[in-house]
Image: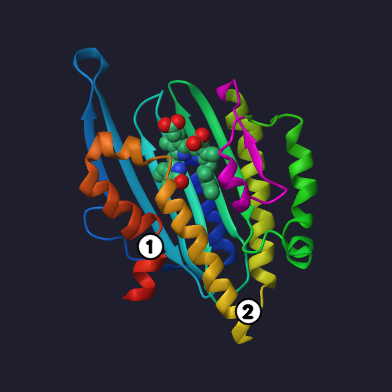
């Protein structure tokens, strides 16, 4: 069992219990991908597995799980709501590299600067954030331009100990996901055409940013080459533009 497998298992189990899951197609060749790196004793197999499903309110629930030994574990788990809901994105970037752990968990807002939106989708999560931030202190250095996409309840931390990932980070992941599923349950479809246009624009802004700045691009390109990587990013991880033009 690798570090983030319990996170993924937990998330799928929770989703199954509270929502009607339907499959979401993963393009051929991207369900599972392997590469071998290093030589001799340092040889390591890097396995990237994808998971995806959808529900009546959620356009795509997807995970990319990279397993490459003790010093390389990544779970990137994102929920993209359908465009007729004003739900935030659920985003978790759980990263273990030779340099240490890097954790980002948030409900990323569509409309960060709207007080009404903050009151509905960020303020209820602040107590959850407060509960964990003593164990999981602010992670420091952070790309300035990314701040536009995060909520005031953004959990960003670099735990020193793997034990802290298995305990506090896992608990935080569960609590954020639970809060998110409550939002999903309560969400009502939007019918106002101006709001629908704003939602689509906000979703596109977010997904274009994530695709363009994907911090995993370098890693994936090294392991699997640039053709596979660009197709994985635009055709699966951040696929909204493709879906809209299909
Ligand atoms: N990040 C992804 C996807 C990944 C992934 C799809 C499938 O969006 C992994 C894999 N994130 C990943 C890896 C690293 C990071 C780092 C491998 C390490 C990169 C490296 O050091 O080589 C939050 N993730 C990061 C960083 C941030 C985030 C801020 C540090 C990178 C840096 O300092 O530039 N998550 C990231 C982010 C958003 C988010 C920017 C949203 C806007 O949700």
Residue 33 sits in quarter: top left
Q: For residue 128, which numbered disc appears in the image?
A: none
Tell us which disc is closer to us: 2 or 1.
2
Please name the residue shown 52% across and 65% down the image. Answer: 203
> How is the protein colored in the picture?
rainbow
Q: Position of residue 37 (x, y in %)?
A: 23, 26
Residue at the extreme top: 41
- Is residue 174 one of those drawn in magenta? no
- Quarter residue 161 falls in: top right
Q: Which residue is mark 1?
A: 239
Relative to 174, residue 17 above or below: below
Residue at x 24% of width, y 13% of height: 41
First in residue order: circle 2 vs circle 1? 2
Taking the image as shown, residue 152 lies to the left or right of residue 92, namely right
The residue under label 2 is: 195
Q: Secondary structure at mark 2?
A: helix
Query: How many residues crowd around disc 2 within 10 Å: few (fewer than 14), some, or many (20 or more)?
Result: some
Other-residue count near label 1 (Cα within 10 Å), few / some / many at <14 / 14–19 / ≥20: some
For the residue pair 61 and 199, the one nearer the viewer reads as 199
Quadrant position of the C terminus in the picture: bottom left
In this orientation, does residue 15 appear?
yes
Q: Which residues are magenta?
A: 141-162
Pick the front one: 175 or 27 = 27
Question: In this orientation, which residue lies closer to the viewer: 109 or 133?
Answer: 109
Where the N terminus falls, by quadrant? top left
């Amino acid at each position: 069992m690798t570090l983030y497998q319990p996170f993924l298992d937990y998330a799928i189990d929770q989703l199954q219990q509270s929502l009607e899951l339907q499959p979401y197609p993963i393009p051929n060749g991207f369900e599972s991908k392997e590469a071998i790196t290093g030589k001799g004793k340092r040889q390591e197999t890097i396995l990237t597995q994808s998971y995806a499903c959808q529900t009546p309110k959620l356009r795509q629930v997807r995970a990319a799980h990279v397993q490459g030994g003790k010093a390389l574990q990544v779970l990137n788990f994102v929920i993209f709501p359908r465009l007729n809901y004003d739900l935030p994105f659920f985003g978790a970037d759980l990263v273990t590299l030779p340099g240490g752990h890097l954790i980002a968990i948030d409900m990323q807002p569509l409309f960060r600067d709207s007080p009404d939106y903050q009151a509905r989708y960020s303020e209820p999560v602040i107590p959850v954030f407060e509960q964990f931030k003593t164990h999981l202190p602010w992670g420091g250095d952070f790309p300035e331009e990314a701040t536009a996409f995060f909520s005031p309840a953004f959990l960003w931390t670099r735990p020193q100990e793997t034990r802290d990932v298995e305990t506090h980070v896992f608990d935080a992941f569960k609590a954020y996901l639970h809060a998110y599923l409550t939002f999903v349950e309560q969400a009502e479809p939007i019918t106002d055409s101006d709001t629908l246009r704003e939602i689509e624009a906000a979703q596109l802004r977010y997904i274009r940013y994530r695709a363009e700045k994907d911090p995993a691009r370098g890693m994936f390109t090294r392991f699997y080459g640039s053709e596979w990587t660009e197709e994985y990013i635009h055709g699966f991880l951040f696929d909204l533009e493709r879906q809209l033009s299909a």
